[in-house]
Amino acid sequence: MSKTAIVCGAGGFIGGHLVNRLKRDGYWVRGVDLKSNEYGNTNADDFVIGDLRDPRVCESLFDRAIDEVYQLAADMGGAGYIFTGEHDADVMHNSATINLNMVHLSHKHGVKKIFYSSSACMYPEYNQLDPDNPKCSEDSAYPAAPDSEYGWEKLFSERLYLAYQRNYGLQVRVARFHNIFGPAGTWTGGKEKAPAAICRKVAEADNGGTIDIWGDGKQTRSFLYIDECVEGIIRLTQSDFSGPVNIGSDEMVTINGLAEMAMGIAGKPLSINHIEGPQGVRGRNSDNALIKQKLGWAPSMPLEQGMRLTYEWIAAQVEALPRP
Ligand code: NAD
């Protein structure tokens, strides 16, 4: 008999890709989300449109034996959504409620393993002030000082899952994702992240034109291509290591460097206009020592390869928009 899985947040970017991967691996998959996947990822055997803040919706997902739960649903977005402060109450309330419901019902219904997607945003700001030397090893999480309420909720929920493991023996797997990007992700509308936003701006710009970048562009980040993120989720869930563990790339780049990479891929030399905007921490990079040690694997795809695939997809979306 094939294994059964629930993917929470299946209408979203990573959840959509994860559903496809689990289907390829032979699972029976039930997706659940407030919305279906905009980019046509409808491979789930069953797709429930429902609100995971509602415990009755969560309860209804367990009308058959479920082996694994992948909890990726969250109220989230890029810097323009989580760092402005305007959405703090919703971000904390909505995501915490989903996690409280899903961990409890997974325990109640005897789920064998539950995967939870935390974020690098839970790392303390004081270790990420120097763009050249950010510290994001898993053991640097405490004393806790995330720079956003989104990060605080992730930290709370990590602890919630691990407490269920300690007290009730529920098998949990916790990953801290570092900036995942790729095709079929949010690329417009205000919730998109830097790689998608930059690809869109480059695709929309006229040759010789200008693109806006928030801040001085000297802040550093690393970005992980979606396929490697999904590979990390599967490998972690199948392993006997609970985490928390980073799933990210350790190829660090400045935001200016990322913009120049996108221009190079597009073959469009453009100028950069630095404007005021939310930026988050000065520097962040994945530390992959622990994942290598525990799983004998770490992401390795060069950033440019992922950016090329992403640019092609976003340029096609821009191209398909009706012309004014
Ligand atoms: P996403 O926004 O594309 O997907 C999240 C999905 O959750 C959305 O489709 C949304 O509709 C759904 N959702 C939100 N509230 C819900 C509710 N009440 N009931 C049902 N569904 C609800 O985000 P993503 O990029 O796919 O991220 C997936 C997970 O990974 C999130 O938990 C996110 O915090 C985490 N994460 C992502 C990144 C990244 O770079 N993408 C980085 C760190 C952590």
Image: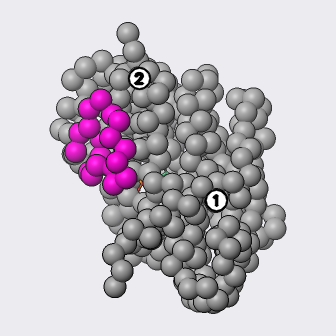
Task: Name the residue that disc number 2 marks.
Answer: 27
Q: Give the range drawn in magenta.
A: 32-49
In the image, is residue 37 above or below residue 270?
above
Q: Are marks 1 and 2 in contact (CB under 8 Å)?
A: no
Cα distance, mark 1 to mark 2?
A: 31 Å
Q: How crowded is mark 1: few (under 14 residues within 10 Å), some or many (20 or more)?
A: some
User: Which one is nearer the viewer's eye here, 30 or 323?
Assistant: 323
Residue 306: % across, % down: 64, 54
Q: Is residue 48 magenta?
A: yes
Where disc 1 sits, the SS reads helix
In the image, is residue 90 above or below residue 111?
below
- State the residue at coordinates (35%, 29%): 29
- Please identify the dominant SS of the magenta region: loop
Locate the C terminus and report the quarter of the image it occupies.
Answer: bottom left
Quadrant assignment, res 133: bottom right
- State the residue at coordinates (56%, 36%): 233
Q: Is residue 266 left or right of residue 323?
A: right
Q: Is residue 50 left or right of residue 262?
A: left
